[in-house]
Structures are given as C-alpha cells and as structure tokens.
Image: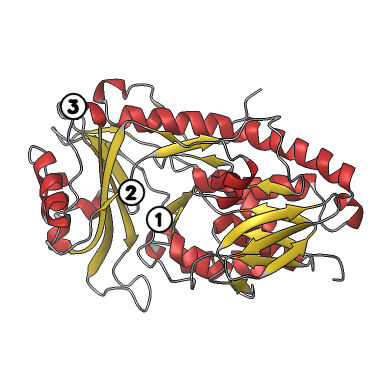
C-alpha cells in the first residue's frame, strides 16, 4: 500500500461505501468529515434503498451486508419480507389513491447505516475542508486546522453544500424551488398514532385537494426494534410542504411553526390530522428551503484529479427518495471506470479519460432522477397534477440516451 492514497471528502453514505470498497481491496485511502463525530447529528432521516441494492451488495464486504438488519427502521416487517405499499392519500377524504410497489426495497435509518459503514474505517473527524492544489500527478487537500494531505485522486462526497463543488465550479448556484417545508420528529404511543401504524410499516404520504398541502410521514424507529429503542413508542418523522404561491411564510419562532403546521392541517381527515396535531409543544420544527443542482457534461475545471460523487454532483429533492440510490451507484460507476487496484489507472491521461466516461455514466442515470425529483416536488403541492406524476410513479433505474 505504498501508492499515494485516495482522498475522500465526506463520510456520508457514498463516502463510506467507497471507503469500505477500497479497504476491501487493500487500496490506500483517507476519509475526512467536518462533523466532530459520527453521532453529531442524531436526529437523522430514513433512507429508502431499492434499485441501488445490487450495487451496494457488490461494493461492500459480505460481513457488512450481513449486518444490514442493524439499520432497519422496522426489523420485524423487513424479516417477513414486507417491502411496504408506500401509499399516497387524499387527505380530505382519507382515501388511498396510489400504491408504489417494489420487488425489493428496504427502509433504513441513515444514522444507523452510517454507523455500520464506519466499521473498521478510520474516519478523520472534525476536518473542515477548505481548498485544493493539484499538479498533473497529484492533488492536495487543505483543511481549516492547517493540515494537508496529498493523494492521487480526490473524491468529493461532501453533500449538497459541497465545498469541493464550490472550488471546482465557483460560478455555480443552487436552484431554489418555490416550495416551503417544515419537518419534525417525535415519539408517539400507539394511542397517539390513532391507527396510522397499520397503514404502512415504513412510510406514507398524501395531499389535500383544496389546500394542496403535502404530508410525508415515515418511521425512524419502531417499538422494541433495538435494545435502545423505545419499548412502547414509535419514532416518527412528519413533514409538511406547500407552494410559495400560497403566500404562507415560515415563522422564525418554533412555537409559531408548530401552530402553523396545525393550522395548515386542521381540515385533514383522521388519522392524518392527529399525526400533526399531537406534536408536543417542545418538539423542534425545522425549516428546509428546497434546492437542487445537477452538474453538466463537458464543463471543465482546474483540478482534473478531483471528481464529484453523490449529492455534490446531483442534489435532488427528497420527494422520490432517489438521492441515496444514485449516490451508491455513482460509487460503483466510479470504481468500474477507474480500476483503483491498478496503478496505471492513475496515469494522467488514463485517469482523465476514465473520469470523462464516469461523468457520462452518472449524467445518463442521474439526470432523469434529478428531473423527476424536481417535478415530484412541484406536483406534491398541486393535487391536480398527481395523475401520471413521478411523485407517485415507480422508482427504478433509468438512463437517458
């Protein structure tokens, strides 16, 4: 392992999957993350993995794949082969309008998946990436603490707010979508769930035909799922969104955000109304401004040994749940195009050519996901657009021509 290492910026899902792959093949690497520790953000999100699962199994060592159940938000449902219906509801009538079937699908805790993927991986935490210098043969990453590391390839897995992307494409700006979003997570008893736990073991969603306010509901954990899980409560994530055209601004004060969520859902049918109205007064409500961005082919930058992966290359809205799936397949496409086991793959011309082909692979696959995710976001807040919308369409691997 005398060759210069691969530098991975970001210990999210894609960065850690790449690290596991490199470690499995005894390829030198270093991985850095700006957070102080793996559990710095304990609230987390759930992730739905579907068409990326074959790629994930191909990339990871068997002993990590065998431990996937440690990440499931509902181990009991997954053990019986339940992939969920992922229903979409009319929130006025309570009628189920659509199912989104899948032959294979798992719902995981992002926090638990990251914890699993750090197994045996030496992540250097609290490393705030600042800048790059590169030559024809090597690339150096500089960090806020004054340290620097040199390698033969820098792989940017640093997310939707990618510092690497800012360096490579300083003129790029995110696309802000005309949608407001508020989200909270809380613990509910079965009584507080009001029967909602029987709808789906993982997620469901819906919209009101008059107000066009959208609901996304997911379980982050279920009673007795793990030793540290609640014995009698469901850990729930509740998200509302609505179009800017409603002219309903998001308040700065948390209590006012809770009040707004309850006001927006006052005319919903049960059990959907109570899922929002039972939110405790001390729950933190976060406002997220929805933005997206997709890289363009052929756009040159000054650091040919740097490459974008995952959200740094294609930031998608969460309305189809395809960001993580694309990020995982990005890693497989990268290691397929750049055989990191072969030193000659890092010769300047060979690497340049391989990264061009990698970007073509990513663009052909991720652009349809990116566009569908944007449209799904807009349609979620316009009930009249649901029929035929990618919001309620199948999730599968597509490539543009």
Cα distance in 3D space between marks 2 and 1: 10 Å
**Disc 2 and disc 1 in contact, CB within 8 angstroms:** yes
Residue 375 picture location, percent across and down = 41, 27
What's the residue at 25%, 25% (across, down)?
A: 383
Q: Look at the numbered disc 2 and give the secondary structure of its residue.
A: strand
**Mark 3, residue position:** 209
Most extreme residue toward the bottom is 227
**Mark 1, residue position:** 46
Describe residue 90's horizontal placement relative to residue 227 as left or right.
left
Describe residue 363's horizontal placement relative to residue 371 as left or right.
right
Residue 320 picture location, percent across and down = 42, 38
Query: Are there few (<14), some (14-19), or many (20+) residues within 10 Å of tag 3?
Result: some
What's the residue at 55%, 57% (across, down)?
A: 13
Task: Answer with the quarter of the image where residue 60 lies.
Answer: bottom right
What's the residue at 86%, 52% (across, down)?
A: 346
Task: Answer with the quarter of the image where residue 318 lies.
Answer: top left
Q: Quadrant of the C terminus?
A: top right
Cα distance in 3D space between marks 3 and 1: 27 Å
Q: Is residue 218 above or below residue 379?
A: below
The disc at residue 211 is none
**Disc 3 and disc 1 in contact, CB within 8 angstroms:** no
Q: Look at the numbered disc 3 and give the secondary structure of its residue.
A: loop
Q: Nearer the viewer, residue 178 or 269?
A: 178
Q: Earlier in the sequence, mark 2 or mark 3?
A: 2
The disc at residue 203 is 2
Residue 311 picture location, percent across and down = 54, 46
């Amino acid at each position: 392992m005398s060759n210069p290492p691969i530098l991975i910026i970001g210990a999210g899902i894609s960065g850690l999957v790449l690290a596991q792959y490199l470690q499995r093949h005894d390829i030198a690497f270093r991985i850095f993350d700006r957070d102080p520790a793996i559990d710095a953000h304990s609230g987390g999100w759930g992730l739905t993995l579907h068409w990326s699962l074959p790629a994930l199994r191909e990339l990871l060592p068997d002993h990590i794949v065998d431990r996937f159940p440690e990440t499931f938000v509902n181990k009991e449902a997954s053990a019986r082969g339940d992939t969920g219906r992922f229903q979409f509801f009319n929130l006025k009538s309570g009628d189920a309008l659509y199912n989104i079937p899948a032959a294979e699908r798992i719902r995981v805790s992002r926090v638990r998946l990251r914890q699993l993927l750090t197994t045996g991986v030496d992540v250097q935490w609290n490393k705030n990436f600042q800048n790059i210098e590169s030559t024809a043969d090597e690339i150096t990453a500089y960090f806020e603490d004054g340290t620097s590391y040199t390698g033969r390839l820098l792989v940017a897995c640093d997310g939707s707010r990618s510092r690497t992307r800012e360096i490579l494409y300083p003129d790029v700006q995110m696309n802000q979508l005309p949608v407001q979003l508020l989200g909270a997570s809380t613990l509910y008893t079965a009584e507080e769930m009001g029967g909602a736990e029987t709808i789906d073991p993982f997620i469901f969603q819906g919209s009101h035909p008059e107000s066009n306010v959208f609901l996304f509901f997911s379980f982050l954990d279920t009673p007795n799922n793990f030793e540290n899980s609640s014995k009698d409560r469901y850990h729930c994530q509740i998200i509302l969104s609505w179009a800017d055209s409603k002219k309903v601004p998001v308040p700065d004060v948390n209590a006012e955000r809770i009040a707004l969520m309850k006001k927006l859902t006052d005319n919903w049918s049960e059990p959907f109304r109570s899922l929002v109205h039972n939110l405790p007064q001390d729950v933190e409500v976060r406002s997220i401004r929805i933005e997206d961005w997709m890289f363009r082919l052929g756009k040159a930058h000054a650091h040919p040994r740097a490459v974008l992966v995952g959200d740094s290359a294609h930031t998608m809205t969460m309305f189809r749940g395809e960001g993580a799936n694309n990020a995982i397949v990005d890693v497989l496409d990268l290691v397929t195009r750049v055989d990191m086991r072969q030193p000659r793959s890092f010769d300047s011309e060979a690497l340049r050519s391989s990264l061009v082909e990698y970007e073509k692979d990513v663009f052909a696959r991720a652009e349809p996901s990116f566009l569908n995710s944007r449209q799904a976001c807009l349609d979620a807040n316009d009930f009249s657009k649901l029929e035929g919308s990618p919001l309620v369409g199948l999730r599968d691997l597509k490539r543009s021509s």
